[in-house]
């Protein structure tokens, strides 16, 4: 039961003050029995003898649920760890709900309900100055025991009654405190204050340590935060083991459970020559001779073994516990020597769904051993660390999925069309937001042409990336139909409206013809491209800027411009030229100037594409990365007229023979007589198939570049299919020969028919265009 200072036993045992004679009155005055009671004496009494509020009492612990680490989910810390170690004092009689003791109880209860003092700062054991988050009281005395203010001296009655108040004398301004009725009260008060201070230090340490752990985003930062928060404040060394591989979400890994030593940290064994501590290495399995030697880096958890049982129980254990004595050799290795006594704590790390590892806290033999309350501290550290690891693993998986989605939506590699060289760059808005709606593409078209596309979907979410992928796929399909640029944008606008009412995007679509040295461009609300000419002059092309894709009900206009050999066309998204500190037109002008400066460095020759793209990205300042950036640069080389042979042929029976003669003359002019027989055979087969169904003139074109390309066009939209001809069939073998003898071949549908093409490899040493 709680003893109060106003009990009957206290009054009976209180000493009485001796009478004193008053020189003025001449009569003896008697003081009240027990003297005048001090109103603060009740504040100095402990709430309950031997009662110390324990932070974290009633801390609920859940067990694991896989790999034989199931455990009892209803187990709580109030039941105490195994072997009766670290039992909480939840069965003690509660303190009175008044005075400092009641306030302290309520304070500890509030701290426990708010994640055990997460709002407190400081460190454990009084050495929390390194966290910089705890201010000592103004009097410099931790704990703030009432009646111990600086400069205040308690006035105690003298044994001889000399200090008794005389009769008729004026009442003193202050009432002196009475002597305590209990001789051991001062000692008990000091012990209670010390215990209260130690409990407060534990709360402050837990608050500072959990905040440091929670600051980490990735796995290494969280584990490092645990090590830095506990060494040397709570332990002299720590080992952190995590499952390898770490499970993600609801995944249930198959195979044996393996714990890998993720990180260790310890106090150096000896100081350096200057008397300072040596720096702690980031990871060192060697714990030193005094701390157990070398620990194992891999440990396989045997189902039903001692380590699995400890992990299933979840609660931290002292190393002296029977379960821990058999589990630690399985975890650390049989040759590891550990300090004796309560100087080792084994704490399982449980995430949201399962046990994901274990942490081992060690103290040197020359340091005080762990106390039972330290098991609660280890449980809090293990819980926050495990939840942080779960968070980091889930975040890492989401970032990986987002990055893989973004990279999949963009082309893995750019094609190498004839007459043009390409280079590209893509930068996300930030490392934490790797997805966005910016994209670029280069699509080969019939007639050695190439379509250059760059677009930007509004937003930086997975939805924006998905919409970008749909629009990019639609653009590739429309490009395969060989539609004009303005028609491609019109169909993209219709597709965006089908995806949703708020699906907005900008896009620029350009088609380059290397034979005609012309480029046709259509714009849908996108920043205009920049053309860098061979002489170093950079100009912003005047392209009509239409409405963005998704508005609906608008027309798009295309313009045709010259694309001389040696010129470079730069397509980009607004993230390159627009930011919080500059508007889009200022950024476009800076881009034009940067391209001109880069061209001046190489003189009359155009700058290389890859370094030029890097120079363009260098124009971005530290605060200019507000949006994704997609960059596509195209160097126009073109095809010289001398490397092109073009004919129109009437669809007659004699056309195949005429096509063979024209092809033979072109090869003789180019010095490629070695390809004559092969080319004549394939040209005859393709032209024969074309004139059989065509009603308008058939086109035949030969292009000499790094390969010999032959293109045959007609007005029939049906594409030929490769099939195996039966022995009784008269035809059906032409495409089979083309497929066997040509380097590559294909067929592309046009707006007014189709084109069938094939390529032949150049013979060694043959002249090339």
Image (cartoon, rainbow, N blue to C red):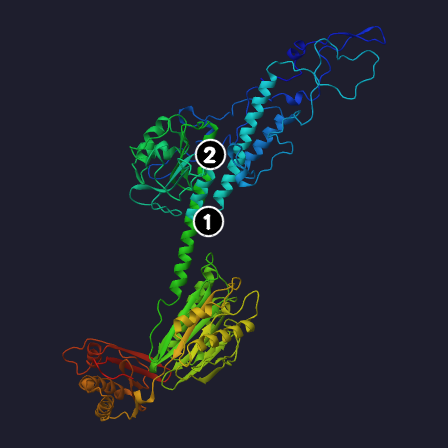
Query: Residue at horizontal 59%, vertical 15%?
Result: 184
Figure check: 142 above or below 543: above
Farthest left residue in view: 727
On the picture, is 706 further left or further right than 191?
A: left
Q: Position of residue 319 (x, y in %)?
A: 38, 29
Q: Which mark is residue 217?
A: 1
Figure check: 607 above or below 644: above
Figure check: 103 above or below 634: above
Question: Observer-nearest residue: 602 or 479?
Answer: 602
On the picture, is 158 further left or further right than 720?
A: right
Q: Position of residue 43 (x, y in %)?
A: 66, 23
Secondary structure category for the residue under label 2 = loop
- The quarter of the picture where the N terminus appears is top right
Farthest front residue in view: 273
Q: Quadrant of residue 268?
A: top left
Q: Position of residue 519 (x, y in %)?
A: 42, 82
On the picture, is 130 further left or further right than 416?
A: right
Query: Residue at horizontal 43%, vertical 31%?
Result: 75
Question: Observer-nearest residue: 403 or 595?
Answer: 595
Viewer-nearest of discs 2 and 1: 2
Nearer-N-terminus badge (2/1): 1
Crowdedness of circle 1 by 10 Å Cα count: few (<14), some, many (20+)? some
Farthest top residue in view: 27
Q: Quadrant of residue 705?
A: bottom left
* Residue placed under numbered mark 2 in the picture: 234
Q: Which mark is residue 184?
A: none
- Alpha carbon distance from label 2 to label 1: 23 Å
Residue 145 visible in the picture: yes
Secondary structure category for the residue under label 1 = loop
- The quarter of the picture where the C terminus appears is bottom left
Crowdedness of circle 2 by 10 Å Cα count: few (<14), some, many (20+)? many
């Amino acid at each position: 039961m709680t003893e109060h200072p106003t009990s009957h036993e206290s009054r009976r045992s209180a000493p009485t003050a001796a009478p004193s004679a008053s020189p003025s009155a001449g009569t003896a005055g008697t003081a009240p029995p027990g003297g005048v009671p001090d109103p603060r004496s009740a504040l100095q009494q402990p709430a309950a003898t031997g009662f110390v509020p324990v932070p974290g009492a009633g801390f609920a612990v859940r067990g694991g649920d896989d790999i034989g680490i199931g455990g009892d989910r209803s187990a709580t810390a109030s039941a105490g760890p195994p072997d009766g170690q670290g039992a909480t004092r939840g069965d003690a009689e509660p303190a009175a709900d008044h005075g400092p003791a009641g306030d302290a109880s309520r304070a500890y209860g509030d701290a426990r309900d708010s994640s055990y003092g997460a709002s407190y700062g400081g460190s454990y054991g009084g050495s929390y100055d390194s966290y910089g988050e705890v201010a000592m009281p103004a009097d410099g005395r931790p704990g703030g025991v009432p009646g111990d203010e600086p400069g205040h001296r308690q006035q105690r009655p003298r044994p001889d009654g000399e200090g008794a108040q005389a009769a008729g004398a004026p009442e003193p301004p202050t009432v002196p405190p009475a002597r305590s009725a209990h001789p051991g009260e001062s000692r008990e008060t000091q012990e209670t204050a010390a215990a209260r201070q130690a409990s407060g230090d534990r709360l402050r340490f837990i608050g500072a340590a959990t905040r440091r752990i929670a600051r980490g985003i990735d796995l290494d930062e969280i584990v490092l935060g645990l090590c830095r928060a506990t060494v040397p404040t709570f332990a002299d060394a720590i080992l952190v083991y995590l499952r390898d591989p770490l499970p993600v979400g609801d995944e249930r890994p198959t195979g044996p459970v393996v714990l890998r030593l993720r990180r260790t940290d310890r106090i150096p064994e000896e100081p350096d020559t200057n008397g300072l501590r040596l720096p702690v290495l980031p990871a060192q399995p060697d714990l030193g001779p005094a701390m157990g030697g070398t620990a194992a880096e891999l440990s396989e958890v045997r189902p039903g073994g001692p380590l699995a049982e400890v992990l299933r129980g979840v609660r931290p254990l002292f190393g002296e516990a029977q379960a821990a004595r058999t589990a630690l050799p399985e975890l650390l290795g049989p040759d590891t020597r550990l300090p004796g006594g309560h100087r080792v704590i084994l704490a399982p790390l449980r995430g949201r769904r399962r046990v994901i590892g274990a942490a081992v806290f060690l103290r040197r033999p020359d340091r005080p051993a762990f106390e039972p309350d330290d098991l609660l501290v280890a449980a809090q550290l293990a819980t926050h660390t495990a939840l942080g690891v779960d968070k980091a693993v889930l975040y890492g998986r989401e970032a990986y999925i987002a990055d893989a989605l973004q990279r999949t939506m963009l082309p893995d590699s750019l094609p190498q069309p004839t007459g043009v060289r390409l280079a590209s760059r893509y930068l996300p808005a930030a490392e934490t937001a790797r997805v966005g709606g910016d994209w670029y593409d280069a699509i080969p078209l019939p007639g050695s042409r190439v379509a250059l596309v760059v677009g930007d979907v509004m937003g930086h979410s997975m939805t924006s990336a998905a919409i970008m992928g749909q629009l990019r796929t639609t653009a590739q399909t429309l490009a395969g139909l060989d539609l004009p640029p303005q028609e491609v944008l019109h169909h993209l606008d219709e597709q965006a409206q089908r995806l949703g009412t708020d699906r907005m995007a900008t896009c620029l679509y350009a088609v380059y013809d290397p034979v005609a040295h012309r480029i046709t461009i259509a714009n849908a609300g996108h920043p205009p491209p920049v053309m860098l000419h061979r002489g170093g002059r950079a100009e912003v092309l005047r392209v009509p800027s239409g409405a963005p894709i998704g508005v609906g009900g608008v027309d798009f206009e295309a313009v045709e411009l010259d694309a001389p050999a040696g010129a470079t066309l730069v397509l980009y998204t607004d993230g390159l030229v627009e930011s919080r500190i500059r508007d889009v037109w200022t950024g476009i002008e800076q881009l034009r100037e940067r391209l001109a400066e880069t061209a001046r460095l190489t003189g009359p020759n155009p700058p290389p594409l890859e370094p030029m793209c890097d120079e363009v990205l260098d124009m971005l300042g530290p605060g200019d990365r507000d949006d994704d950036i997609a960059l596509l640069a195209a160097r126009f080389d073109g095809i010289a007229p001398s490397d092109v042979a073009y004919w129109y042929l009437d669809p007659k029976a004699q056309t195949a023979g005429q096509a063979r003669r024209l092809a033979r003359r072109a090869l003789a002019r180019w010095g490629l007589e070695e390809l004559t027989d092969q080319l004549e055979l394939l040209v005859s087969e393709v032209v024969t198939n074309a004139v059989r169904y065509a009603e308008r003139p058939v086109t035949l074109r030969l292009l000499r570049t790094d390969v010999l390309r032959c293109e045959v066009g007609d007005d029939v939209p049906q594409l030929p299919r490769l099939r195996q001809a039966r022995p009784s069939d008269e035809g059906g073998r032409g495409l089979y020969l083309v497929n066997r003898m040509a380097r590559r071949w294909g067929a592309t549908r046009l707006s007014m028919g189709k084109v069938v093409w094939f390529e032949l490899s150049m013979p060694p040493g043959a002249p090339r265009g």
